[in-house]
Amino acid sequence: MTVGTQLLFREDAYQKSTTASVTAVEGNKVQLDRTLFYPTGGGQPGDRGTLTGANGQVYAVLDTRKGEVPDSVLHLLAEGAEAPAVGTTVTAAIDWDYRHRLMRMHTCMHLLCAVIPGSVTGGQISDGKARLDFDVPGDSLDKDEIAAKLNALIAGGHTVETRWITDEELAAKPELVRTMSVKPPTGAGRIRLLDIVGVDLQPCGGTHIRNTAEIGPVLVTKIENKGRQNRRVNIAFAE
Ligand SMILES: [Zn+2]
């Protein structure tokens, strides 16, 4: 059984803990009525952290995944681990240092889209590094030039905002969708846009930092050839 969860990370990516009620438990999968834990999706890994019961018992969350129904979130404990009881209240806290690194790198991938013209065909964010694949020809990408442009945008201190538009507004502006592999979910009536003001605007349901300066310096570690029209650009934190 999966039930919908109030997704607090969509409204405030900086909230680190919340109280919540346990609504369902199935094996090592715990569901809450609301959560800060981002479930794996859009190339961003799921959060980890802890659920703490009223009696002080701590349940370690190793990963977070989407459930079967829209907006349901499964908090994954270790296989065989004891879970908090349905109906009890827990304090749910994310591993903030880990999440913040993912938020910085995720936001950096939006900047990379602004630096490299061409459709994005895939990507993956992990701890301290990330990659995006672009549908661009031949040797058109220069590692040093991309690094210089990317770091200039980061240092530029651009404001990062989210806002919502309707499905109809998005249909009228197909150019907003940069990724060919990940189509934004339509049909719910509204789409969440990530706006790096004056730099990049595209649909995204992930978690982001508030200002590009928070990313810090990055390196273009390598550009790989993954087929005739596919270049994989790898990024890592410089420090
Ligand atoms: Zn995003």
Image (tube, grey):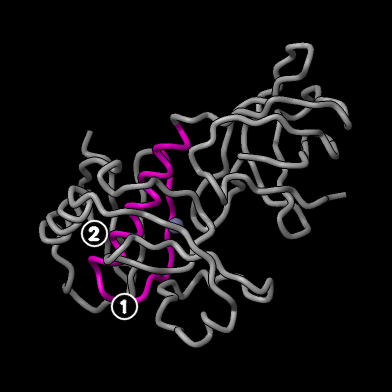
Q: Is residue 98 above or below residue 152?
A: above
Residue 26 seen by the camera: no
- Tag shown at residue 149: none
The answer to which image quadrant residue 126 occupies is top left
Cα distance between the residues tagged 2 and 1? 13 Å
Q: What residue is pinned by disc 1?
A: 229
**Left or right: 22, with 227 as reference point:** right
Q: Amino acid at mark 2?
A: Ile
CB-based contact (under 8 Å), mark 2 and mark 1: no
Q: What residue is pinned by disc 2?
A: 223
Q: Residues within 10 Å of mark 1 (few under 14, many from 20)?
A: few
- Confirm if mark 2 falls within 8 A of ligand 1: no
Q: Does residue 109 show up magenta in the picture?
A: yes
Q: Is residue 36 above or below residue 107?
A: above
Range covered by the magenta-colored residues: 98-127
Residue shown at the point (68%, 76%) measured from the top left: 187
Q: Quadrant of ligand 1?
A: bottom left
Element class at badge 2 = strand
Q: Earlier in the sequence, mark 2 or mark 1?
A: 2
Q: Is residue 80 above or below residue 3?
A: above
Q: Amino acid at mark 1?
A: Gln
